[in-house]
Amino acid sequence: MSSITELLDRWRRGDRSVEDALASDVYPVLRELARAQVRRHGGALTLRATELANEAYERLHGQQGVNWQNRAHFHAIAATLMRRVVVDYLRERQAEKRGGDQLFIALDDMNQREAPSQGDQVDWLAVDQALTEFAQAAPEAARVVELRLFSGLTKEEIAEVCGSSRATVGRQWRFARAWLAERLDVVPNDDDGG
Amino acid sequence: MTTAAERIRRLGELFDEALDLDPVAREALLQRCRAEDTRLADELARLIERDQSLLGSEPRTALGLVETSLDARECDGLAPGMRFGVYTLEQEIGRGGMGRVFRATRSGPDFQQEVAIKFVRRDLLHPALLRRFSTERAILAALDHPGISRLIDANTTPDGTPYVVMEFVRGQAIDDWADARMLGIAERLGLFRKVLAAVAHAHRNLVVHRDIKASNVLVTDDGEIRLLDFGIAKPLGRLGDVKATQTMDRFLTPSSAAPEQLAGGPITVACDIHALGMLLYELLAGRLPFAFAHMTPGEIETAIRQLPPPPMASRIGDGDGVLAQARSLSGVRELREALRGDLEHVVQRCLRKLPVERYGTVDQLDHDLDCVLKDQPIHERHSDRWYRWRKFVSRHRVASGLAMLLFVTIAVAVAAILRQNVAITHERDRAQRAVGLLKNAFAAANPTGITGANVTAREVLEAARPALEATFDTQPDVYADLAGTLAEVELAVGLSPQASTLAARAVSAAENARLEPASLGTLLILEARARLAAGDYSGAESGLNRAAALGISATPEWQLAQGMLYSHRSQSREAIQHLEKAVRETSDRRPSDDTANFARLQLAAALRAADRSEEALALLDQTLAWQSSSLSSDHPRLTQVRLSRLDVLRRARGAAATVPEARKVVAEVDRIYSPNSTVSALARNSLGVALNEVGQREEGVQAIRESLSAWRNSVGSDHPNTLRTAFNLAQHLTDIGGSDDEAEALYREVLRRGERTNEEVRMPIVFWRNHFARFLLGRQRPTDALTLLTSAESVREVAVRPIKASHLSTYVTLLREAAAAAGCNTKVLPASLLPDPSCDRATEILASPVVSAPVTDSDNAG
């Protein structure tokens, strides 16, 4: 699968046009792994995004010989796809249940490896939707959110991947987080009549 | 008026500024901001507050877990037989996004009443939902209309579950009801107008339903309709406040949602209009605009947001006899007929992607349906043009959505194959359907089929290739299907070299898979057409011969391709024979059929080339009449024919007769498409040529100038058509005189760009250069002419490429003329004035065997 390697090289050199082609190679793998994960967990509705990303990394790196520049490089690409996998997964799930179940996770998952706190629940599909809207205004900050929520990268790594500084990434994250939190808590029937 | 994105950006800037300030300075910033824009200041204040409250807990880096307890709602303790207050639950009758619905009995001292009780799911009891729930109560209480199910009570159960009690409606979903009674089209419209009356009542009370669909519209035994489930209904705000509010919920049914609902856009009455359009479509055609049942939610969303709904009549298959019967019609033909025309326009207008393009009110929709029932003209058509224009200019947007659809399709198909899943057939069928949708959308977006016009399409297709290639060895039959379809798309958007490569791959996959001769033959014909378009005539010929050997030479598709091959080789007589056969064989097809249309256009072109323009004109006129019988007057196919007709008309009836028609076509095209479209460029070019011929040269030149600018804007400055038009303009300018600078700049541009792109596309560069040289000689600039003719590019063109004998001899004549005029033969001039080394090169070229050897006209030379 040297074509992935080639696409990655082009992508790293700033050629955004290869993203779709890359996605079409990596997405099926992620999707398959996601399904396998759900099966493994006895059908429980659990998706561990970082675990999934690591598995995908192993699969593509080990079995298909894809030459990732480094771990951060892979996760940066996988974050976008992971978001798509999760959203598609939830939608499919939702469709299966006939317009049924909303799935919740904490937007700001306070403690690693802990279930989301009950008081701060958000509809994940709505997060995706809000993030898409937000990205139109602030694509860089939205990218930071995507990486923080869907990749296992540290702040430093995110800054590196974004070609930015830790401080800038921190500020972008704070704005995005505040905006999303505000956006997602708003009740559709807003009170000012507007 | 600022957009949402601008607002967010502004907030981001202010927020960033505020981060550096202490609380006092921050308050001052807010004060300043408030003076300008109160709402913005409020939003900023809330964001800062949010940020502060989240700050204490340094956020984690990972997504962590996505989980929920699926079984929560099973534990709400609700079950038939349960009693509370005056109600006894009888039977669960529904489960929706918000909760469960039971049929129940309400017992009073002297009566018993059947009611429906809706409970909110307890695992969803968060404040937002509770607020919506109470909204629903308020809404229902405000609505009193026989067509809307009545609110009886609203309360919470002893353990705190909120519920509403509604009138229980015994009835049947509107589509089932109509089918069961075999209602004809007019009766269905009558029934549907009752729904409109109920929805209009809700709208007058400033409520939109937001989830209108067949299962929410019941019809009672006495034929009255009842609108159910204002489950996600929402007040529109205060009276007169037309500004819509954003929606945040995903509780709606995706397949009945309007595009802007899925995009999280504003909710207005236009959402209900869209849903009513879907309902009407289903009620009439027996199915929704897209085959949602076979799509993933992502595909459904793409379809609703991006793809134009296919016409209702096109959805009626030959096996739909039962459908016709249920509408009291004798057969599918009659059904298709009934669904065409104004009714189709009304439905399409409801289903526009942009809310502003739909009916503004339910009453307007009702009025048009009234017109349809009374056989009066509707007011619809005007905005239809606007719509088509919009559709055309938003082509790129469409294509990017399609990229996603295609990507999902291929990814799914490939994933299935990799897993060797038993569901392959199903997945493949779905993939093919999706690609079919894609193909139609491309065709709709690019009515003239001018090559290179759709850059985004190229990206779409290239992105799909790697995923597709993976199937070549493992699943050759799948590969043959998908690659064939993709090649067709590529050919349609003008990527002929890519299309021929892919079609050839599809052919070999089909052979590996031992597909039946008919399938293989279809692919061979496709490959031949792609090769023809790419200029590879002998490749096309051998493909057609192979197809003929499979015994499919009688099909109109084969005849058409064979005829085109002859046309390209200027063998008019043979071309006309084959094309006439293709036209005859397709005479019973519909006006929207690809082969039928293409065969007619090709035959007209071949007749014209054979100086039989009268016949060509008659054919095109007949084609127009045939198309007008079922297509709207501004359908892309009609535009295509009217455009081709201009040239034929000029040859048959002269330029004077053509000018007024050309003006009409230009005006029409500007209205339907845009002045900067390929269609407009073609129309303006024809107008310019006709004007020049009748001697109105200034005006003619202006038309061609506009044509050139349209080409530049639509396909770019390097496109062959842009270059040809620029060359024509330069020639006309030369003829009129007085614009030498403009003409020279154009000649130079054409040659510069043409030399650069000539590797891929054959262009008559030598011919162009000859003209420019003559231009220069005519202006007493022999040295410049000589430099031009002896340039490295020029020599290479003449020496290496096969060119027409006439072009070569003109070149030689000009070269001699230029050399003489530049004084190459005069030995008396001082050496410094000699135009060296051009003179030497000229002598060299004139002595070379290329120039002196006999040349023949070649297939490929322009």
Image (spheres, coloured by chain):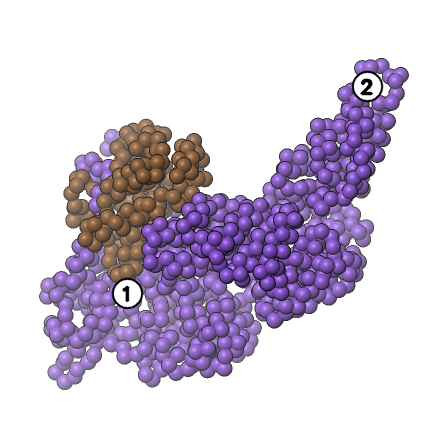
Chain colours: A brown, B purple
Q: Residue at x 56, y 73 (%)?
A: B377
Near-viewer residue (B46 or B90): B90
Residue B382: horizontal and vertical position, in percent?
Answer: 56, 63
Residue B396: horizontal and vertical position, in percent?
Answer: 50, 48
Q: Secondary structure at mark 2?
A: loop
Q: Residue at x 63, y 52 (%)?
A: B542
**Nearer-N-terminus badge (1/2):** 1
* Residue type marked 1: Gly
Q: Horizontally, is B179 left or right of B140 in the view?
A: right
Q: Quadrant of the C terminus of chain B?
A: top right
**Mark sitting on residue B834:** 2
Q: Is residue B368 above or below residue B491?
A: below
Near-viewer residue (B716 or B795): B795
Residue B357: horizontal and vertical position, in percent?
Answer: 48, 60
Label 1: chain? B
Which of label 1 and label 2 is nearer to you? 2
Near-viewer residue (B630 or B696): B630
* Residue type marked 2: Leu
Q: Horizontally, is B349 left or right of B52 in the view?
A: right
Label 2: chain? B
Q: Residues within 10 Å of mark 1 (few under 14, many from 20)?
A: many
Q: Horizontally, is B596 left or right of A95 in the view?
A: right
Q: Is residue B284 visible?
A: yes
Q: Residues within 10 Å of mark 2 (few under 14, many from 20)?
A: some
Q: Secondary structure at mark 1?
A: loop
Q: Residue at x 58, y 64 (%)?
A: B593
- Tell me if label 1 and label 2 are in contact, CB under 8 Å: no
Q: Which residue is mark 1?
A: B231
Q: Residue at x 70, y 28 (%)?
A: B792
Near-viewer residue (B14 or A129): A129
